[in-house]
Structures are given as C-alpha cells and as structure tokens.
Image (spheres, grey):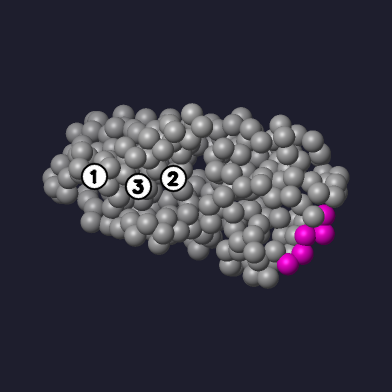
Amino acid sequence: MKKLLVLCLTSLLVLTGCSQSSRETDPNRTSFKVGIVDGYQLLAWKYVRQEAEKEGITLDIVEFDDYTIPNAALNNGDVDLNCFQHILYLNTEIKANNYDLTPIAKTVLAPMGLYSNKITDLSELQEGARIVLPDDTSNQGRALNLLASAGLIELSTSETEIPSLKDITSNPKNLEIIESLANSIPPFLAEVDLAAINGNVAFDAGIRLNDSIFQEVVDLESDNPFINVIAVRSEEKDNQYIQRLVELYLSDPVKEIIETETNGSTLPIW
C-alpha cells in the first residue's frame, strides 16, 4: 500500500506539472532537461551533458523509476526530451493519452529474454508453471510473441501483430500468467518459474542477456518496432539545440559507454 501511495503521488505531481513546469518554446533557449529510466543511460547522458556544456548548452538529467511517467512529464513540459522506450511503446502511449510527442532519433535495441532461477531449459517447465509478463500493451504483446516463438503457446495473431492475452489459442502446459510493470519484474524470479524481461530492465537488475533461457532474434532493421528512440514534443522536433544534443548522443563515445556498461546486451544501432 505504501509503494502504491508513493507511485500515485509521483504520478500526480507529474500530471499536474503543466501549471508548474518550465515549459518553453523559445527556439533560442539553450537549457534543456532529458528524462531517463535506465541506469546505463545516466552515464551516456552525462557524457552528452559534458560535451554540450562546451557549446553553451545546459542539460539537466531527470531520472524516473516508473515507465509510466516520462512521457507524461515530456508532454507536460517537465522535461524536453526523453530516452527510455521503444517506438511501439511510445506510439501506444501517444494513442492512449493523446500525447503530442514525436520520435526524432533511433538509439538502441535491447532484446527481450525469458529468464528463470528454477530451470535451465524450457523443456523443464512443468504443467501449471507460473510466468510473469509485462502488463503494458506493447511489452506484453512482445512477450507473448516471444513465448509463441519459443513454442510455449499459440496465438491467433501473426508475428507482425501485437497480441493480448485473449489471443492465446493454445496453452498446452497451462501456464499461469502473472502481469506486472515491466521494470518491476526481476524480483519475481525468486517466486515464479519464468519471467519475460526487457533487455534494459534485465541489465539494471544485474542480469545478463546471456543468462536468458530463450531470447528474441536480433533485428536491427529500421522498421523494428522495438528499437528505442529519443522523443520530444512535436513542436520542438526541429529545435537546433535539441538536434545537437541528439548528435552528441549518437556518437562513438556514447556507443562505447553503452556497449561497455551493458556487456553487449544493449545494441546501439548507429
């Protein structure tokens, strides 16, 4: 109950932030805020901040611990760009909340994997095994497709569609599916038989991609909906200083930071 209250209060502060935010649309301003969730992104954006300061651009880094907040903060003007989500999650949030946000750069791919502290091979899964999946539409659909590709379930949808639980047509092991916030799944490994965990969430929990029992096929093609992006308010997509921050991010030093900090489990696409 205490955790729920804290999350509600945090969300309330963000959602009411429009009246208190520092939102500005002045094209000549040189002070910005970036919202992030993942730990490795902190080091990446610290590098960007350091280099931006040399060019007279001020960048503050705002860390969030809940995936549901950064887009609300961006839309309300509490931050000016964010870097934490794949394109499908962003599009789902835009549709659900009528946000006026736009992706302006593709960044990394963090493959989703199936992890377990109880088994070492999917063939060991018992009847009625418990599995935890993300509860948001896009990541849950991604997890269901992963389960289908692993042969654990069958779906009525194609591989290019985003399924929901109602689209499961066959569940031969009668898996018990538990839903949770995507970034709250790792602790469940102590209780359940299997967990579908996003790559960046796994990294933040100290879990390596190589520890997964089964993982997504890596696809770095430009139309992959699970490639992460940098998003901004649509009205500022052409802001020259934001564009410069993006250029500093899409650099070799940042690529090296990401590859080193994530032990290769998160793949820069530039």
Closer to the camera in the image, 1 or 107: 1
- For residue 66, the mark is none
Closer to the camera in the image, 249 or 160: 160
What residue type is disc 1 on?
Cys
Give SS at disc 3.
Answer: helix
Q: Position of residue 33 (x, y in %)?
A: 28, 38
Query: How much space separates mark 1 and mark 2, taking CA atoms?
Result: 16 Å
For residue 5, above or below residue 106: above
Q: Which residues are magenta?
A: 169-173
Q: Position of residue 53 (x, y in %)?
A: 25, 31
* Neighbour tally class for label 2: few under 14, some 14-19, many 20 plus, Cα within 10 Å: some
What residue type is disc 3 on?
Ala
Give SS at disc 2.
Answer: loop
Location of residue 262 by image quarter = top right
Q: Position of residue 70 (x, y in %)?
A: 38, 43
What residue type is disc 2 on?
Thr
* 18 magenta-colored: no
Labels 1 and 2: the sequence-earlier one: 1
Looking at the image, can residue 205 be seen?
Answer: yes
For residue 29, above or below residue 223: above
Q: Which residue is mark 1?
A: 18
User: Do the residues under discs 3 and 2 have CB atoms within 8 angstroms?
Assistant: yes
Location of residue 190 by image quarter = top right
The residue sitting at 81% across, 49% down in the picture is 128
Q: Which residue is mark 2?
A: 68
Looking at the image, can residue 264 be seen?
Answer: no
| Residue 94 relative to residue 75: left or right | right
* Neighbour tally class for label 3: few under 14, some 14-19, many 20 plus, Cα within 10 Å: many
User: Do the residues under discs 1 and 2 have CB atoms within 8 angstroms?
Assistant: no
Closer to the camera in the image, 182 or 203: 182
Q: Which residue is mark 3?
A: 72
For residue 30, above or below residue 173: above
